Image (cartoon, grey):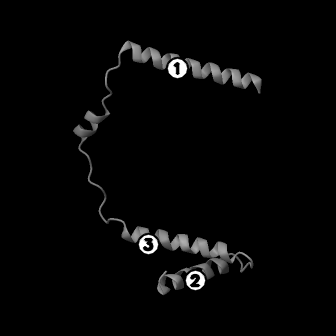
Amino acid sequence: MEMKLIERIRERAYQLWEAEGCEHGRDMEYWFRAEAQIAGEQADEQAPAQPPQAISATETIAEAKPKSRGKTETRMETDTAAAIMAATRKRSKKV
């Protein structure tokens, strides 16, 4: 780690320690919290300034349209759901 970053973490850990009543024996906790906070701040600084481009409404509708299902596929889903519900009922009765 570069010295400038270590100094920032040290200062932030000290601020956290003071803010929480100067309790001794928790120095590593304050250090790790300070390190995480500063890493988060650095990530925010490096994030792109512009939001991602919006998708047009027609693209969204086309992607959201579900494919048609056959009777066999629907029947299998119903059978699977019924089997899961039956197993759940059996477990709840045992408990």
Residue sitting farthest toward the front: 1
Tell me where residue 22 sits by quadrant.
bottom right
Closest to the camera, between mark 1 and mark 2, is 1
**Residue 73 in the image: above or below residue 13:** above
For badge 3, the amino acid type reads Gln
For badge 1, the amino acid type reads Thr
Q: Position of residue 85 (x, y in %)?
A: 60, 21
Residue at 35% across / 15% down in the picture?
Answer: 70
Residue at 64% across / 75% down in the picture?
Answer: 30
Check whether the beta carbons of the residues at disc 1 and disc 3 lie within 8 A of each other: no
Residue at 31% across / 66% down in the picture?
Answer: 49
Q: Position of residue 39 (x, y in %)?
A: 48, 71
Numbered mark located on residue 10 in the image: 2
Check whether the beta carbons of the residues at disc 2 and disc 3 lie within 8 A of each other: no
Q: Is residue 25 left or right of residue 83?
A: right
Numbered mark located on residue 70 in the image: none
**Residue 31 in the image: above or below residue 58:** below
Numbered mark located on residue 42 in the image: 3
Q: Is residue 87 left or right of residue 61?
A: right
Q: CA distance from mark 2 to mark 3?
A: 16 Å
Dot 1 falls on a residue whose secondary structure is helix
For badge 2, the amino acid type reads Arg
Residue designated by label 1? 80
Give the mark nearest the N terminus, 1 or 2: 2
At label 2, counting other C-alpha atoms closer than 10 Å, the crowd grade (few under 14, some 14-19, many 20 or more) is: some
Residue at 39% across / 71% down in the picture?
Answer: 45
Dot 2 falls on a residue whose secondary structure is helix
